[in-house]
Image (cartoon, rainbow, N blue to C red):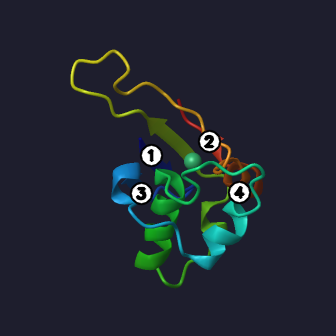
Amino acid sequence: MAEAIVTRDGHVFEASSSDTPYPVFDPQVKRIIDRANPQEEWHGHCALPRAIEDALTQNPDWTIDRFRGASVGAARIAPEGSRRHGEYVGPCRSCLPLFDELELRRAI
Ligand SMILES: [Zn+2]
């Protein structure tokens, strides 16, 4: 899975779930996703929370509120030529609280 998030003021952050061998650790991100019930087996390893965490790490003066109303696009990464490559994928159950809390918009 690859995920891109675009803040309302036009900052773009991308991540891939293969970049996430360790779970998300940013307390602002964790506080939100840890509300998910039920949580997925891969809880904390998704590209979306990783992209937000990376952005917060790169911009220490930001808070997670910077992502309120941001647009999110996700695409499946499948073998080259596969019909499923680039297919839109909605958030998993562990990521849904991010959509609720931050009023994220799905860009398809
Ligand atoms: Zn997820």
Marks 2 and 1, the one that precedes in the sequence: 1
Q: Is residue 45 above or below residue 92?
A: below
Residue 100 falls left or right of residue 40: right
Q: Residues within 10 Å of mark 1 (few under 14, many from 20)?
A: many
Residue at which label 4 appears: 102
SS for tag 3? strand
The residue located at (39%, 54%) in the rendering is 15
From the viewer's perspective, is the residue at label 2 or at label 1 nearer? 2
Q: CA distance from mark 3 to mark 1?
A: 8 Å
Q: Is mark 2 within 8 Å of ligand 1?
A: yes
Question: Of helix, strand and loop, which one carries label 1?
Answer: strand
The residue at which mark 2 appears reads as 92
**Tag 1 residue:** 3
Q: Is residue 76 left or right of residue 61?
A: left
User: To which quarter of the image does residue 71 belong?
Assistant: top right
Q: In the image, is residue 7 above or below residue 89?
A: below
Question: What amino acid is found at the position of numbered circle 2 in the picture?
Answer: Cys
- Say which amino acid is labelled 1: Glu
SS for callout 4: helix
Q: What residue is at 43 percent from the left and 34 percent from the top?
A: 75
Residue 51 at x, y percent in the picture? 46, 60
Q: Label 4: few (<14), some or many (≥20) within 10 Å? A: some
Report how many numbered discs are placed on residues in the image.
Answer: 4
